[in-house]
Image (cartoon, rainbow, N blue to C red):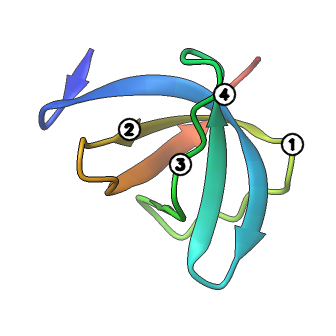
Amino acid sequence: MDSYGAIIERGIVQDAGENGYRVRSISRHGIVTPAIKPIDDAQYAVGTPVYFFLFEDGHGKILAACDE
């Protein structure tokens, strides 16, 4: 499934900061995103499974929480 040219993936919120959330990909082992923000104003705890997308330039968004 594509979102504006990026593939939607499943991941786990690895850490949170004022610049956004870093997400560890479940789909691509070893990939951790740069800080990305949710599409809406949702708040996520470390360890929350989420759907996210990431473009090749490192920009992306968290779409929603998901069941792992």
Secondary structure of the residue carrying numbered label 4: loop
Residue type, numbered disc 3: Thr
Residue at 64%, 19% in the rendered image? 29
Residue type, numbered disc 4: Cys
What is the x, y in percent for residue 31?
Answer: 57, 33
Q: Is residue 61 above or below residue 43?
A: above
Residue type, numbered disc 2: Phe
Residue at 56%, 15% in the rendered image? 27
Residue, far left: 4
Label 4 Cα crowd, 10 Å radius (few <14 / some 14-19 / many 20+): few
Whole-angstrom CA distance, mark 4 to mark 1, is 11 Å
Whole-angstrom CA distance, mark 4 to mark 3, is 17 Å
Pointer 2 residue: 53
Secondary structure of the residue carrying numbered label 3: loop
What is the x, y in percent for residue 5?
Answer: 13, 32
Q: Earlier in the sequence, mark 4 or mark 2?
A: 2
Whole-angstrom CA distance, mark 1 to mark 3, is 14 Å
Pointer 3 residue: 33
Secondary structure of the residue carrying numbered label 1: loop
**7 horizontally vs 43: left or right:** left
Label 2 Cα crowd, 10 Å radius (few <14 / some 14-19 / many 20+): many
Q: Of circles 1 and 3, which is in front?
A: 3
Q: How many marks?
A: 4
Pointer 1 residue: 47
Q: Earlier in the sequence, mark 4 or mark 1?
A: 1
Q: Earlier in the sequence, mark 1 or mark 3?
A: 3
Residue at 13%, 37% in the rendered image? 4
Residue type, numbered disc 1: Gly
Q: Earlier in the sequence, mark 4 or mark 3?
A: 3
